[in-house]
Image (cartoon, helix red, strand yellow):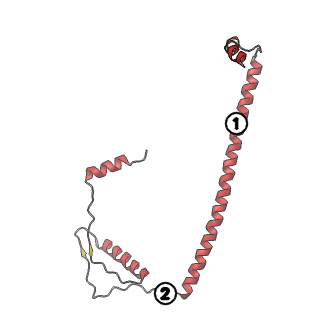
Amino acid sequence: MSELLYSAPELLLKGSDKKLDGGTITSVVITGLTVVFIGLILLILFVSIYGKAFDFFNKKKAAKAKAESEAKLKEAAKGAPVPKAAVVKSDTPAPVVEDGIGDEVVAVIAAAIAAMGAANGKKLALRSIKTAKGARSAWASAGAVENTRPF
């Protein structure tokens, strides 16, 4: 063992006794490239087959979940009363609206609140609408946008 350690530098300096000609070098390079590309092609095929298998199982699971949810909805719809449309009574006061907010926006917000109340079985009323004030200054908002912008 110690002889090998002492003779290793001499072997490196001396080189190999084999004479490598152009044909041998070319065949080694072509064999190496062929093996690498065949390995890459097999890896690509493996990953694509693996992905298609997971897509198949995920679609199957999603279809099963959808069928179960539709069955539950049908059962719930059989015994559940049909919700009536939200009717705004004339005795409810009009909401206080800040200047600059259009009538269409007020109508949409009121309809959304009425729909939420109907879904919960409660009567909700809209009392006022105000513009939200920003918590940051314009410079702070610009800095946050600049620092969180994707590359």
List the residue tagged with mark 1.
Answer: 37
Q: In this view, does 21 lie above or below 39?
A: above
At x 71%, y 39%, the residue is: 39
Of 88 and 35, the residue lying toward us? 35
Q: Tag 2, which secondary structure?
A: loop
Residue nearest the viewer, comparing 84 with 1: 1
On the image, which quarter does residue 85 sit in? bottom left
Where residue 29 sits, quadrant-wise, is top right
Where is residue 125? Give x, y as percent: 31, 80
Q: Work out whether 104 lies above or below 22.
A: below
Give the mark nearer the N terminus: 2 vs 1: 1
Of residues 54 and 149, which is closer to you in this image? 54
Mark 1 lies on a secondary structure that is: helix
Instruction: Give neighbour class at mark 1: few <14, some 14-19, many 20+ (Cα, 10 Å).
Output: few
Residue that lies at the very extreme toward the front in this rendered image? 2
The spot of residue 55 in percent (x, y) is 64, 58
Circles 2 and 1: CB atoms closer than 8 Å? no
Numbered label tally: 2
Instruction: Look at 29% across and 73% down and name the residue there.
Output: 103
Residue drawn at (70%, 17%) of the image: 2
* Real-space CA distance between mark 2 and mark 1, rounded to the nearest whole angstrom: 65 Å
Residue type at mark 1: give it: Phe
Which residue is label 2 attached to? 82
Q: Where is residue 31 in the image (x, y as percent from the top left)?
A: 75, 29
Q: Residue at x 58, y 79 (%)?
A: 72
For the C terminus, give its image quadrant: top left
Badge 2 amino acid: Val
Which label number is shown at residue 124? none
Residue 37 lies left or right of residue 150; in this view the side is right
